[in-house]
């Protein structure tokens, strides 16, 4: 049983560019959350998707947007990249009504 | 504001000893708590969870204690092994109606041979 998978694993972008990160949830899970983890910090909630809609959003600007597809996979898009967007981006999936969140290995984004 | 903090940023223990990692949370209404282990270059891995209606929960070599009076969580690891070396995060889930987990900064556990 595949767990949460994310792609790509590493990415380098230039300031001002746009980036798309992808996540496939664990089998049987229908809810996807995205987190940003800066070096030496705990993950910070970006937003959560359920039934192809953003259900809750953390304190992140509109440059951060997402999408969920009918197969429950999800994308995180970040526009107008800033140096401060450099971080590990984590995807977590849960079953609707469940509480235990399973995380992927993350995408390491470096903005130069 | 919301926060989940940890008392010790780094904890070093001898192999075979017991480890205790502490965490303070700020939202007294949070109803669910999780401990995660994160190894270098990997995503957080679920260790154990506890609901707010419990004081203690045991897993394999791990025990989580919840003290709601002082808003404190602890993770106890018995017979610590080299493979336990990692960063440990506690996370809280605010009450029903919110879907995010609030993580602390983390504690690095170093197991000494």
Image (cartoon, rainbow, N blue to C red):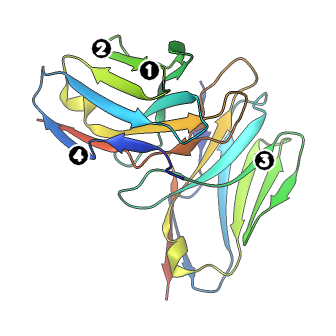
Closer to the observer: label 1 or label 2?
Answer: 1
Residue A36 visible in the displayed image = no
Q: In this figure, which residue is indicated by the disc labeled 4?
A: A10
Q: Is mark 1 in CB contact (under 8 Å) with mark 2?
A: no
Q: Quadrant of residue B8?
A: bottom right
Q: Nearer the viewer, residue A10 or A88?
A: A10
Using a 10 Å C-alpha cutoff, classify the residue at mark 3 as few (fewer than 14 neighbours), some (14 to 19) or many (20 or more): many
Name the residue beneath numbered marker 1: A69
Left-right relation of B88 to A10: right
Q: Nearer the viewer, residue A81 or A103?
A: A103
Q: Which residue is mark 2?
A: A63
Residue A95 place in picture, x, y as percent: 65, 33
For image coordinates 64% across by 52% down, the residue present is B35
Q: Chain of mark 1?
A: A
Label 1 packing within 10 angstroms: few (<14), some (14-19), many (20+): some
Mark closer to the chain start, 1 or 2: 2
What x and y, as percent, mark residue A110?
19, 39
CA distance for labels 4 and 1: 23 Å
């Amino acid at each position: 049983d595949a767990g949460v998978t994310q792609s790509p694993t590493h990415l380098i972008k230039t300031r001002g560019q746009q980036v798309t990160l992808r996540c496939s949830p664990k089998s049987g899970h229908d809810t996807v959350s995205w987190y940003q983890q800066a070096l030496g910090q705990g993950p910070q909630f970006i937003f959560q998707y359920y039934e192809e809609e953003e259900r809750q959003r953390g304190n992140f600007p509109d440059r951060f947007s997402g999408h969920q597809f009918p197969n429950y996979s999800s994308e995180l898009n970040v526009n107008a990249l800033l140096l401060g967007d450099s971080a590990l981006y984590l995807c977590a999936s849960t079953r609707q009504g469940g509480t235990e969140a399973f995380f992927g290995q993350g995408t390491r984004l470096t903005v130069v | 504001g919301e926060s989940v903090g940890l008392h010790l940023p780094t904890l070093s223990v001898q192999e075979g000893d017991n480890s205790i990692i502490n965490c303070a949370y700020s939202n007294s209404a949070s109803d669910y708590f999780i401990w995660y282990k994160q190894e270098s270059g990997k995503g957080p891995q679920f260790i154990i969870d506890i609901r707010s209606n419990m004081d203690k929960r045991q897993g394999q070599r791990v025990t989580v204690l919840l003290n709601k009076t002082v808003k404190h969580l602890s993770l106890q690891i018995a017979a610590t092994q080299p493979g336990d070396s990692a960063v440990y995060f506690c996370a809280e889930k605010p009450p029903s109606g919110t879907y995010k987990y609030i993580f602390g900064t983390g504690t690095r556990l170093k197991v000494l041979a």
